[in-house]
């Protein structure tokens, strides 16, 4: 009964920490505000990740030097690396903070973990950045299948398993922004007015390929390619190939860019002959 | 239809919220869609296994929509009103078709048809899936359509906005919802928004239990605020604990039921405390306890049953791996390539978070809080399907007593479908208590969310266009009503901000994160797999103490810009009230039914408790009282829920086993 009464919970709330890790966190109170670094000494257990450490700091907002401070602000939601929210720059590399396990990232006593906001997006506060531009990009390329409405009109088209696997892989893009952080051609634009002519980046190009690959999504292929032939489109890609290396979902982004590049060229030639 | 000033607000951008937004906007009424996160990041992304619907293959093997309906009721231990469940099962195939047309990459057979997998609570393959991230793929499909509507100006997305309070005008019978107060989570601006109907699609409340499989946004705060404003809360005690999760420091990550659906086997070493490498333990030294106890359903018994068996093996029999609270979920006997194709997403999660490859090493798992069957209480208009007498036991493979053409379980387009007890305030998706009774079957959640949005979205449109007179629309309500609601929220915020002191507060007594942590541990210990009256009473005492401490809470951040601590601390107050509803319902429900298992009342008691617990909040005293409302069981007669378990000796159970044909 004694065990049953706790529903399998250990008697104390958490396992006893085995060691401490130092976090160096780049902080900023809001747009236009100065940045500063704060260090925290965080006790960790074998299953600790960056999220559990940030949670610990929220409960104990005191720096390593004993200074009272505020909880760190960051964006997160699912904590299973499937929503894309908690992306930040950890020890210089853009990745999801939920899947960053402390024992892997900082295995030795005295190791330091540095957290910074992604540099390609405007900072909202601390580690939280505004990625609206990425979603605007999806709107620009009409990243949807233009269905005839939600009425009952029967099944969609049949599809070969290989085609489905290809689309599924592309469709696991969670708009996290890692590929944009790593891209030398993608630059921070603070003002929404400047987004229109700025590079859309790998994630959006790959989504264009996804919808062009769908039998009905293809209907808008011309419009998508028109949008991507202009300024900020596929020709802005400098072929650095960083994007594909950092994608947490291992989406073949460079293949997508190449595919869109080829389709855009064919489309442009066609447009030339059609005279529009 | 268009050309009027009517508007609808949808709160929440998961599957239910997006489906509702699309449907209402398509009906010609503009939608304001509020979400705390970009809608593409909503908690629906976490759903892995699939979505249930009758399909041609299963149909030709003797399955039907009726049987899907029957399984859902049986799984839920008959605690759901039957009409809406029938309608949901009837609509399921159409919903799959629609998602298919939207481009959701459902897995395919070699001939190009949608592939199917086996899931808990059924002996037929009726679960459609897109890899092992089905929820993500369905959400993206709806997100894409929402983006299309937004680009056409029909849906106005307000992302990073937090719902604070429903605005209710009038008294008594005339009470109706005319809008919401919400806050921009970046600028912290608090603002009122008018609407002729408000759809709450804000998901579950797993964070009340601390570590769960839920996303951090699933605090139940929005539902609690509606509850405190007068909406009823139904079956709060019905919380699903998923049998297979990966325990972590920050959350428990789901390991989908599809792992078992694709052939995964649950076992522990037969020798207590065996610390050998699992791959070196011979077949006859393994105890496949689910397969042994439930020869018919095996590893695919419903979740509450699997959870209790795993719990029993670990906690009572001390047979967990190496004496710890863990069992093996084993896929290593299967082809690694097949696993990658069917389950890649979840295997990757295990590999990333537990550091071992499940294709070659059995996974270590333990149950975790997963889903809230309870939610805001809602009503509906019954449809025209009324059998002369409720059907008896319907076994798999039996001919359907009713084809899908017999009639509706719920009237399409009726104004009050899934409306709360407050006119104009609807609840869709997980925050709605209507469909899953006492346990939700795997792969029925995605269905119920989208069904609510599509089927009942039409009810919202009809209500707004026909049920609200033109001269009584929200646009005509006095500005004072809205100003007052904003002032109340501003006052609440000012009060919290005033608790910040320069020296900070490290006193755990009044630290919001500490209080939340204690609430989670207490709720998990008292009100999950196994409950008892005395333990729940103790839990209610603890919540009382926490509420007392919360009244003196010290906020750690005074910022007037992007203050997450404020948002969390405000929600904590709402979570405490939610916790009380859950524990109180559990204490008063003196029986065991579905996910609700009372050690001191181990049997189902239909005479007393074939009823929904309905909580009502007293705003003056801050107390919750529970009413009991009859469940509508006119279509199927409740039968004992055994899933063909063997080795039960009580006569009632044996009879049931015989009757269910095992």
Image (cartoon, rainbow, N blue to C red):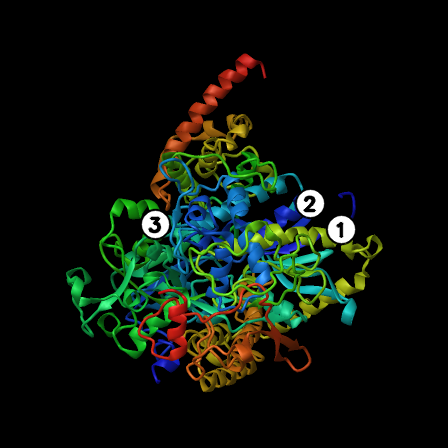
Residue A30: percent from left, percent from top: 55, 55
Residue A248: percent from left, percent from top: 37, 46
What is the CA distance from the residue labelled 3 to the residue labelled 1?
A: 45 Å
- Residues packed near mark 1 inside 10 Å, few (<14), some (14 to 19) or many (20 plus): many
* Dot 1 and dot 2 within a common chain: yes
* Dot 3 and dot 2 within a common chain: yes
- Residues packed near mark 2 inside 10 Å, few (<14), some (14 to 19) or many (20 plus): some
Tell me which numbered mark, 3 or 1, is placed earlier along the sequence.
3
Residue at mark 1: chain:
B
Residue B510 appears anywhere in the view: yes
* Dot 3 and dot 1 within a common chain: yes
Comparing B591 with A71, the one in front is B591
Tell me which numbered mark, 1 or 2, is placed earlier along the sequence.
2
Q: Are marks 1 and 2 in contact (CB under 8 Å)?
A: yes
Which residue is identified by label 2? B27
Residue B465's disc number? 1
Q: Element at badge 1? A: helix
Tell me what residue is drawn at x 51 percent, y 16 percent.
A270
């Amino acid at each position: 009964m004694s065990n049953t009464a706790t529903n399998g919970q250990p008697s104390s709330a958490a396992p006893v920490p085995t060691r401490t890790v130092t976090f160096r966190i780049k902080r900023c109170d809001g747009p236009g505000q100065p940045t500063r670094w704060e260090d925290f000494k965080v006790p960790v257990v074998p299953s600790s990740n960056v999220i559990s450490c940030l949670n610990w700091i929220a409960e104990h907002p005191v720096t390593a030097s004993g200074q009272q401070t505020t909880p760190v602000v960051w964006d997160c939601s699912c904590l299973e690396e499937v929503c894309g929210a908690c992306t930040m720059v950890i020890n210089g590399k853009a990745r999801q903070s939920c899947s960053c396990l402390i024992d892997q990232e900082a295995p030795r006593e005295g190791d330091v973990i540095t957290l910074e906001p992604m540099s390609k997006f405007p900072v909202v506060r601390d580690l939280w950045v505004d990625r609206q531009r990425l979603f605007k990009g999806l709107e620009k390329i009409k990243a949807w299948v233009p269905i005839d409405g939600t009425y009952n009109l029967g099944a969609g088209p049949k599809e070969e398993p290989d085609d489905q696997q290809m689309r599924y892989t592309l469709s696991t893009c969670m708009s996290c922004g890692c590929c944009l952080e790593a891209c030398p051609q993608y630059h921070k634009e603070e003002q929404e007015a400047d987004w229109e002519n700025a590079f859309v980046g790998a994630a959006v190009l790959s989504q264009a390929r996804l919808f062009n690959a769908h039998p009905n999504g293809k209907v808008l292929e011309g419009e998508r390619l028109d949008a991507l032939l202009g300024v900020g489109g596929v020709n802005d890609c400098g072929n650095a190939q960083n994007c594909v290396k950092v994608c947490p979902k291992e989406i073949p982004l460079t293949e997508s860019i190449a595919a869109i590049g080829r389709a855009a060229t064919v489309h442009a030639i066609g447009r030339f002959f059609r005279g529009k | 239809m268009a050309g009027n000033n009517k508007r609808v607000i949808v709160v929440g951008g998961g599957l239910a919220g997006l489906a509702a937004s699309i449907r209402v906007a398509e009906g010609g009424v503009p939608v304001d869609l509020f979400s705390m996160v970009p809608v593409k990041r909503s908690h629906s992304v976490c759903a892995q296994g699939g979505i249930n619907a009758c399909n041609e293959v299963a149909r030709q093997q003797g399955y039907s929509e009726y049987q899907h309906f029957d399984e859902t009721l049986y799984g839920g231990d008959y605690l759901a009103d039957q009409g809406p469940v029938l309608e949901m099962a009837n609509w399921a195939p159409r919903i799959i078709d629609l998602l298919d047309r939207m481009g959701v990459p459902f897995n395919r057979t070699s001939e190009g048809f949608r592939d199917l997998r086996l899931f808990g609570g059924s002996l037929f393959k009726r679960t459609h899936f897109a890899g092992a991230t089905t929820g993500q793929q369905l959400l993206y499909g709806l997100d894409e359509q929402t983006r299309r509507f937004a680009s056409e100006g029909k849906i106005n997305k307000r992302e990073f906005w937090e719902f604070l309070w429903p605005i209710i005008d009038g008294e008594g019978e005339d009470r109706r919802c005319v809008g919401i107060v919400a806050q921009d989570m970046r600028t912290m601006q608090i603002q009122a928004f008018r609407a002729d109907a408000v759809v709450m699609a804000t998901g579950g409340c797993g964070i009340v239990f601390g570590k769960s499989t839920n996303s951090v946004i699933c605090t139940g705060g929005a539902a609690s605020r509606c509850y405190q404003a007068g909406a009823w809360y139904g079956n709060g005690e019905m919380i699903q604990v998923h049998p297979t999760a990966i325990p972590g420091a920050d959350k428990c990550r789901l390991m989908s039921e599809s792992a078992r659906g694709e052939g995964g086997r649950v076992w522990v070493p037969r020798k207590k405390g065996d610390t050998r490498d699992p791959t070196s333990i011979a077949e006859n030294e393994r105890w496949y306890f689910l397969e042994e106890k439930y020869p018919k359903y095996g590893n695919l018994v419903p979740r509450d049953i699997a959870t209790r068996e795993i719990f029993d093996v670990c906690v009572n029999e001390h047979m967990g791996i190496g004496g710890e609270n863990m069992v093996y979920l084993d896929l290593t006997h299967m082809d690694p390539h097949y696993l990658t194709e069917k389950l890649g997403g979840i295997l990757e999660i295990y590999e990333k978070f537990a550091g071992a490859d499940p294709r070659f090493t059995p996974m270590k798992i333990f149950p975790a809080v997963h889903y809230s069957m309870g939610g805001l209480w809602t009503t509906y208009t019954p449809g025209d399907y009324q059998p002369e007498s409720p059907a008896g036991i319907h076994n798999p493979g039996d001919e359907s007593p009713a084809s899908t053409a017999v009639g509706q379980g719920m009237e399409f387009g009726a104004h009050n479908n899934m409306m709360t007890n407050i006119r104009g305030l609807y609840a869709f998706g997980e925050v709605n208590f209507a469909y899953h009774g006492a346990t939700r079957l795997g792969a029925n959640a995605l269905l119920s969310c989208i069904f609510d949005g599509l089927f009942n979205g039409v009810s919202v449109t009809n209500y707004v266009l026909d049920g609200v007179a033109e001269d009584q629309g929200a646009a005509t309500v006095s500005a004072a009503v809205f100003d007052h609601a904003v002032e109340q929220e501003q006052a609440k915020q000012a009060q919290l901000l005033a608790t910040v002191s320069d020296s900070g507060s490290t006193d755990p007594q009044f630290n919001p994160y500490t209080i939340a942590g204690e609430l989670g541990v207490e709720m998990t210990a008292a009100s999950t797999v196994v409950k008892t009256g005395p333990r729940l009473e103790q839990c209610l005492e603890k919540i009382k103490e926490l509420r007392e401490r919360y009244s003196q809470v010290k906020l750690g951040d005074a910022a007037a810009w992007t203050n997450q601590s404020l948002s969390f601390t405000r929600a904590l107050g709402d979570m405490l009230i939610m916790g009380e509803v859950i524990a109180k319902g559990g204490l008063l429900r003196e029986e065991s039914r579905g996910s609700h298992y009372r050690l001191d009342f181990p049997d189902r008691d239909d005479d007393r408790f074939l009823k929904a617990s309905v909580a009502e909040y007293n705003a003056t005293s801050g107390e919750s009282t529970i009413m009991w409302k009859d469940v509508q069981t006119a279509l199927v007669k409740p039968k004992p829920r055994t899933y063909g378990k063997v080795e039960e000796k009580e006569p009632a159970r044996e009879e049931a086993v015989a009757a269910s044909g095992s």
